Image (spheres, rainbow, N blue to C red):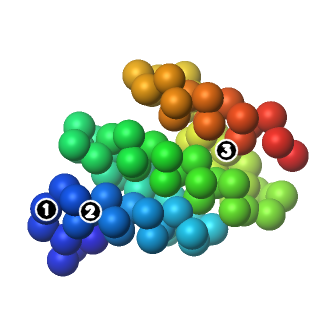
């Protein structure tokens, strides 16, 4: 992410992070939620990352992030995906 300078480059990094079920990837995506140009993609990346976790404490932490996204996002599509992720076991 450090090397990505333009929003479109950062969006590509977020897509790549979506394939990694790791708390560090989740944290990196969360940081991008503060940037309005990246917010939607960062929220989606967080949801997708959280879904990769196996049941346990890390998944619980990740799903807490997804719950917060579902409650606060302004994008209906993101909200729908987050809510769907929360209902899956």
Circle 2 residue: 10
Instruction: Give the secondary structure at mark 2.
Output: helix
Q: Helix or strand or loop: what does disc 1 sit on?
A: loop
Residue that numbered label 3 is attached to: 63
Q: Going by the picture, which residue comes out furthest to the right?
A: 89
Tell me which residue sits at (45%, 43%) in the image.
Answer: 43
In the image: residue 53, left or right of residue 33: right
Q: Earlier in the sequence, mark 3 or mark 1?
A: 1
| Residue 82 horizontal/vertical position (percent) | 62, 36
Q: Residue furthest bottom?
A: 3
What whole-number distance in Å separates the C-alpha atoms at marks 2 and 1?
6 Å
- Up the image or down, 52 lies above or below 61; here it is below
Which of labels 2 and 3 is toward the front? Answer: 2
Say left or right for 1 vs 27.
left
Numbered badge on residue 42: none
Depth-wise, is mark 3 or mark 1 nearer the camera? 1
Quarter of the figure with residue 71: top right
């Amino acid at each position: 992410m450090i090397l990505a300078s333009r929003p479109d480059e950062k969006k590509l990094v977020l897509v790549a992070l979506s394939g990694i079920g790791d708390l560090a990837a989740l944290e990196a995506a969360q940081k991008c939620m503060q940037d309005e140009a990246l917010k939607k993609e960062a929220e989606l990346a967080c949801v997708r990352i959280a879904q990769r976790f196996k049941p346990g404490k890390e998944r619980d932490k990740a799903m807490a992030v997804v719950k917060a996204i579902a409650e606060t996002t302004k994008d209906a599509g993101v909200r729908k995906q987050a809510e769907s992720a929360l209902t899956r076991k």
